Structures are given as C-alpha cells and as structure tokens.
Amino acid sequence: MAQGKDGDRAREEFLAESQELIETLSRDLLLLDSALKLGHRNPETVNDLFRGVHTLKGLSGMFGFDALGRMSHVLEDLLENLRLGRIEMSQQVLDVLFEGVESFQRLLSEPGDAAACDLESFTERVHSLARAKSATHNVLSDYELDPNMLGVLTEYEEHRLRTNLEQGLTVFRLRVRLALDVIDTALDQLKERVKNFAEIITYLPSMDGGGGDSIEIEMLLATKKPESELRAALNRPEASLSAVLRRRLADPQPSAATKQSPVAQAAAPTAATPSLPVRSDQSLVKRATPDVEVSLRSLTSVVRVDIRKLDHLMNVVGELGTVRAALARLVERLRAGAPHALGSEAHRIHRAFQRHLAEVQDGVLDIRMVPLSQLFDKVAVILRQVAREQRKEVRLVITGAETEVDKLIAEELADPMMHIVRNAVDHGIEPTDLRGQVGKSVAATLTVNAYQKGNHVVIELSDDGRGIDPHVIREAAVRKGLLTEQAAGDLSREELLNVIFMPGFSTARAVTDISGRGVGMDVVKTNITRLGGAVDIESEISVGTKVTITLPITLAIISALLFEVRGRLFAIPLAVVQEALRLPGTALRNVDGREVVTLRGTTLPLCRLAQLFRLQDTRQAAHENFVIVITVGNRRLGLCVERLCGQQDIVIKGLGRSLTQVQGISGATDLGDQQLVLVLDAASIIEEVLLARANPLVLGAAS
Amino acid sequence: MSVGQARARRSDLPSRLARVEETGVREFLAFVLASETYALPLSCVREIMRVPTVTAVPRAPVEVLGIISVRGQVTTLMDLRQKLQVEPAPIGSRTRILLVDQGDEILGLLCDRVLQVHRLSETEVEMASVLGSDASSYVMGIGRPGQRKLEAAREAKRRPAAGDEEILILLDPIALLKRQAYG
Amino acid sequence: MQRVLIIDDSSATRAYIRAALESMSEMQVSEAASGFDALRVLPRERFDLLIVDINMPNINGLELISFIRRSETHRETPLLIISTEASERDRSRAMTLGANGYLAKPFTVEALAAAISGVSKASGEGA
C-alpha cells in the first residue's frame, strides 16, 4: 500500500468513491425491482450493477478491505452470470443482491467487524440460485458482421449482441464523425435521443480518414423500431446508418471462421485491415458543433467535496459576518463624527461588502444542500425489506423528493425515518387478508411527501393502515407505569397520540440494519428535536396515520432575534418567531395556575424564561414587558422577556458534548469581542413547557 | 465507587502509564489550586490561556462554570475546584485556563496559577494506592520531581534544597473529565 | 524519465496507481478518466507506457487498444492492461490485439513494478 500523503489521499478517494458506489448500487437495485414487477428486463442496469460491484471489488483489494473484497467477489460472479444470461433475474435473485449491497455498507463502515456478514452462508445462497439453459446455436454466425468489430467486443457486448439478435431485434451500424473536444457530450446526446427504444451495444473509434481533431465513431444499436424512425430520432443526417443483415442461406460462412478471423486479422492491424468507410466531408465537422454547443451548457460537472471543508468555510463566513457587524457599528460612528463625504463613502463600501458577503454565504449554504431523494431512496430499500419480511404489500408514493436540506440534517434524518417506516409497516399496515375484509385494497400505500414552508422543510409520512387507537395507548401507558389512570384520563386525543414519543413507551426496539442500533419513537423525537425540528402525529382509526416532521432547512447561518432577560443577552432563531409584542400587565390571565394571554382571540400560553432557566436576580416580573411568540409545528408559546435587542445574522455553534443534556439551548454564537450569547432551542422549550402542563407526572428530571 | 471498581482502576494504572510512554519519562504540567500543587500529563494539555468572558449556561451540570470562546470555538469550562471538592474562590490575575483534550472534546479547566513542566522518570512517580473519598479517584499518583536530587543530597550527607521536597498530585485526565451520565 | 498514462474510470484506482508509480523513480504520471479522455490525449502527447483498464463504459479497453495500435504515435508503446480474473476471455483478446502484459486487480506495488519492467522488455524498449 502506498505510503505518505499520496497514500492518504488515495485512501480518502477510495472511501468517497466506495460510498458513492454503494449508494448507486442501491438505487439501481430499486430500479430493477420496479422493472421486475412490471415484467421488464433491464440489461443496462444489470450491467451497471456488475461494473459497480466489479470496481468495488478491485478497490477493496487495493486498500486492504478484505472482507468487503470477498463479499464483492461473490456478488460480482452472480452479476456476471446474470448479465451474460447464465442466470435468470427473479425476485429471489434480487433479494440476494439487496442483501449483498447492504452488507457492503456495513463492511465499509466497520471493516474490523467480523460479524458484519456471514460470507459462507451468503455464498451458499448465491450458488443455490438456478441456472438458465444455455443456447446451443451461435446466432452470430447467421449475420453479416464485420469480423474486426466482433474481435474487439468484450464478452458482455457479444452477449448483448447475440441476445438482441435472438430476440428478433434489428442491429444497426451507425457511423458518425465527431470533434474530439466534444466527443463525450455529443455521444451522450445521441444516447439520450435513442435511449427509450434502442440499446447501444458498443462504440468503436477509428482514426482512419485523417483529421487530427475529429474522429469517426461507429456504434452498434439494437432496436425494434424501423430504420426511418431511428434515423429521425438521431437527427444526424450526415451520419450513416445501415442495418446488419442476415447472411443469405446459400453461402454460409463456417462458424469457426467467426472465431478465427477476428483474431488473425487483428494480429496484423495495419494495412491489411479493411478500414471503416470514411466520410471526409469537411462540412460535417462544422455541422456537428452547433448542436453540441447547446448540450455543453446543459452538462453538469460534479465535484466531490469533503463536508468538513464546507464546515470550515461556513465558520469563516460566520466570522466575516461578525466582522461586518462590527464594521457597521464603526461606520455609524464615523458618519456621526466625520465629514459627510467620508461617512457616505464608508457607508457605501460597507453596503457593497454586505451584499457580497450575503452572496458568499448563500453560495456556501447552497453547496451544503442535498435533495431529499437520497434519503428517500434509502426509505424505499428499507420499505421493501420490511414489507417482504412481514409478507405485506406496500406501495410507495414519493412526492417532493427534489426538496433540499442541509446535508447534515439529511444524514441525521436517516435513522428516524427508517424507524417511522418500520413502525408504519409493523403496526400500522394490516395483513393483506384483513385489508380485504375491511374493503381496502390489498396493497397498502405509504406516501412520503416533502415540501418547503418558509424557512422549514416539512416531510409527511402517511399510511392507509389501521390507524392508532388512543384507548390502546392509554391502557399501555398506564400498564407500563408511565401515567396514572387519572392523568391518562385527563389527556386529550391529540395528547394521547403523543404519548407514543415518551421514553419507555416503545417496547419493540427494532434494530435497523442500516445503523445497527436500537431506535425507539422517543429517540426519533429526540433526534429530530435536537436538529431544531418537531414531530407530530395524526391518526384516524382504520383510515391511517400521518407523521409530520418539520425541520429547519439549514443549521448553519440564521437570522436571529436578540433579547435580554435578567440583564443577560440571548438569541432565538427568527424562523420560529411569529411576532414580538409589548405586553401590558393587564392582559395577563391565569388559567389553571398557568399564565396565559389572549392574542387576537386565541389563548397563548406564556413562559417566564427567568423562571425556566432559574436565572438569579430578584427583580419583579413587571419588568418583563415583551412577549416573543414562538411557534414550532402547530404549537405556540409566548416567552416573557425584558428587552428586545434587534436582529442579527448569526452562526450557531454547538455547545460541545458535555452540555448536550442541557435543555432549551441549541448552541451559542460569538457576537464579536469574544462575547458568547446562548441560542434558545424553541422546539425543546415548547416541548418542555407545554408537555409539563399536559403530563405533570411524566417529567423525569425536571425542576 | 465500589471496592471492586477501585481495584480494577488501580490495576489499570500501570498499563495506562506504560501505554503512553515507552521511554519511561513523562512530562507533567504543574499548577496550583487552593494552595495544593497538582499536575496533568503534558500530552493532554493543548493550550494555556487567560480567562476570557465566561458565559454561564442555565441548568448546566454543577461542575460546569460556563462556556468560553476560544478563537471562535465554543468551549466548556469546568470547575476543577468542584471536582476536587475544594472551596470556591474568585478569579484572580494569575488565574489561567488549561485547555485539555478529553478525547472527543477539548475542555477548559480553571487553575489559580500555572507553574512549570516537570519531566518525571519512573522512580519519581508513585502510583496511588489508597482508597478514600471521591477526590482520590481522579488522582493517578504522586510525583516527586526532586527525587533524584534528594537522593544525591542524602548520599552526600547534604541538606536537601527546599524545592526538592516538593510533591505533585498527579491527576488522571481520563477520570477527571469523564462525563457523568445524567438521569 | 518515463511518461505514463493511466486510463481508468475509477478515480480511486488512478490515485492508487499514481501513488505506486510515484514511489518508483523517474515517473511522470498523467491520467485519463475515460476512453474519450484518452482519445483526446493520445494523439497530442507521446507516452512511454500506457496502463489501460479493460472494463470501462462506452469505449471499452479492447476498442481502445485496437485504436492505439493503429495510431502513429503509440503503435509500439508498451501497454499494460488492468483486468480481473473474471474476464479471462477479454484478457486474452487484449493480448491478441496488442497489449504487452496484464495485471490482475487487486495488485501490490511490487507486482505493478514487476509488470512494468516486464512490458518494457516485451515491447523491445528499454526498461
């Protein structure tokens, strides 16, 4: 293994590339799964899977991940047999493939964990898959195929050619001259145009015909469509298109020749080689470019970025923000004291700086954003697995997968979402016979919907299962000692549903394969709350259940409202602030021993932060003149504070592991001159205060 | 801590010490806290700094004094006095913060005065063997930086110098900074 | 100074081979991430050694070798292919088309060095 800095870089490349490969493999398997259900074959995807696993195998070997290498080898053999037609695709084969890819993930994350996969039993399962009968007649000998071309086909390409001919498709030879500089995009474009009805078997380059900047490419395509349609779709009148014809039965070539001649001819590659026909028309080159220029613009180049580099950039941008704020204050003083022209110029420069900084900030934040589709793909894999385990049929409908969130949030969401899906299938969805009895469709539907709402992203997971019975919950809670009979009796229907999130409620701790850790609904809630989000649950008996997750779009730079309590400065994200208003002492009322205020006809519960945080100082409550109304999900709370101190963009920094247990604080921010201001966690405060009112006996270590 | 736990802890010490240094010489940073001289292995001390503005964190555990900003990084400041069960005292001009690497986090420890770095050989370190109050669970042993000079003086039948009799209470950073599990 | 071109679509593999080559003496390493990249680079520069992965999408390694052996500049250049044991038939085709040697993945740095000196001798050029 190579040493030193180069070796480190290579290893990092390996980890990143392998992770991407595994994710792509999962997605491809899902494609195959849907295709199989519809009765389609998908040879291109099988080939992609083969190549992916093949690459993974090679990489693992080079970088010392032996278990992963051995596992990939087993899967690679299976995929090779699949793509060469020696094994037929089936649900069983797919199951084995899914299992294999899942073990890849485990083996990549924990290479030392020997228990991560049982290679022997897996290999046995692979070997037990049935083999297909092999064809007896080599159909290739029936066709007029250029032996040179046959000679450079890989075994796989030859198999695809054979299969297509056996299935009665027509094989065409397409010859086109392309400029070398843009050859990738031009070929991609061609592929795009025909991909729905033609399979591209291979590309062959030929330099014959001169022209150092361009090259003639020959492609073999297989399709059911007639030549005219193919020609029209390709939209390249200068290209030559001809079908591969059957040999006339009168003069058959001995089949042995097709094997010998390519080899013999290829050994003398120079003058003797019959060259591919050449189109030396110069105008072809010129005509090729205008088309291609359009497609160049639509091509995206992707760069892999280490998220730590982005975190660092975010920090720097955050620091710049602090500097900018200090600069703003300085400019103000300057304008007050200095000659008008100087002050104006300083102000203008500051405004320009602010504009550009905002752009950089937005730019960096944007880079961190990833579409939720990555996460939803994982959901699809888990759903399939769990549904098969439980022998239930579940249809997955996803909308809004293009909605974006910060990459770190997406990652933290994986485990909670897995668990919610598992719960939905385990408890929510009825067995198929039961569904039939109550008049529901045999296949249940799980809908995942994501959309942006202001500064938040909302993810809704709904099923059309049996719903949650509040009575069952109440009984279970009392039985487990989480609530007394009386307290349980006082809870509203909505509050009962939320009992599911109480620690100790979920007994069935499902161990997810992805994380290997036990997850309960309480952990789901804690994880999401920690991200600054909220989970809500709605349900109707025999209709279904809906879990709604609300999250901030990004964790990093946010706009915040600064305020004072007992002389101390705090911050709260503007995203959760509905409004801030002056509170006349007379508007306060007392309801069931809690302070509330009536706001435009509705009752708003209040919370005195000084009390909640046990802040010292015996000043009277009358000094708390302002109420900041915060809202998360569909809950609202009014925070009583003393002074409002303006808005500012801040970078929230975590408090460090020692302080993760502290409730109500999501982090701290540096306002410049080393002054740290604590940032409140609205979701957690709302939780704490409102839950205390609902279940006074339930709070653990509170107050 | 139970007897069984303490015994296990004791037998762990030699391996812990040995694990870090093969040459048998370790460096310790000595500091004063409430008139006692303590020392921490130098390898875990990242930085020594003056005390900046400390922001208290509401409802934080009792041994957390608050948070400070170290070049933009939010760092938790721990109260060593609370851990070692020593009386609290105000922050003075010589008070310093030791930034100690706990493993997955860097924490700040307040001390009254920072002294110097001592290089102690095996003979100058004596492992803790006494069970006592909780404070002793953080104590790794005793350091006698002047040991060699003392012995040389004894052999030469000279009176030893005052500083050579100094004793350092060696603190175990792992035990000291281990996070409590909160109910 | 040997000028080497690595043609492989896996960035990790290229990085690995590069690291291995640079630990040997006097190597100037270039990379091509696809058959297309290689097609662009090969006519313009002269290389002393080509390392080609057989299993690439679009233009596969065999087609590339055939092309290389028909070109002016690299008709005789030592060419080492990287393959796996799985494609026995493809590997022998590659040798027939003009490759000088092959190396199976995964390979050690030592194996790479041995293979390189092997193909340099085989093609008649100095090692």
Image: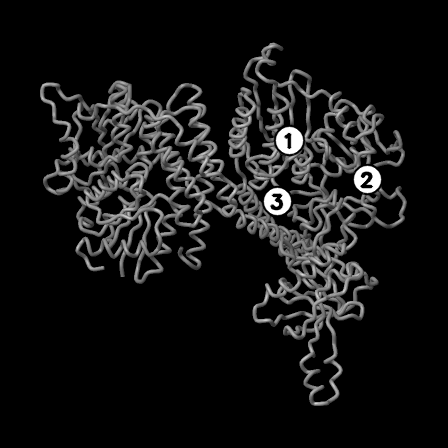
- Tell me how far mark 2 sits from mark 3, CA to CA: 26 Å
Local secondary structure at mark 1: strand
Relative horizontal placement of residue C95, taking residue A553 as reference (left or right)? left
Chain letter behind tag 2: A
Q: Quadrant of the N terminus of chain C?
A: bottom left
Nearer to us of marks 2 and 1 is 1
Q: Position of residue A518 (x, y in %)?
A: 63, 37
Q: Position of residue A497 (x, y in %)?
A: 72, 25
In the image, residue A607 sits, relative to residue C30, either above or below, namely above
Which picture quadrant has residue C69?
Answer: top left
Relative horizontal placement of residue A560, taking residue A481 as reference (left or right)? left
Chain letter behind tag 3: A
Foreground pick, A387 / A533: A387
User: Amino acid under label 1?
Assistant: Ile
Residue at image location 59% in from the left, 36% down from the top? A415
Mark sitting earlier along the chain (2/3)? 3
Crowdedness near tag 3: few (<14), some (14–19) or many (≥20) residues, C-alpha within 10 Å: some
Res. A556 mark: 3
Mark sitting earlier along the chain (3/1)? 1
| Residue indicated by mark 1 | A549
User: Amino acid under label 2?
Assistant: Cys
Foreground pick, A441 / A345: A441
| Residue indicated by mark 2 | A640
Q: Is disc 1 on the same chain as disc 2?
A: yes
Residue at image location 62% in from the left, 10% down from the top? A438
Res. C76 mark: none
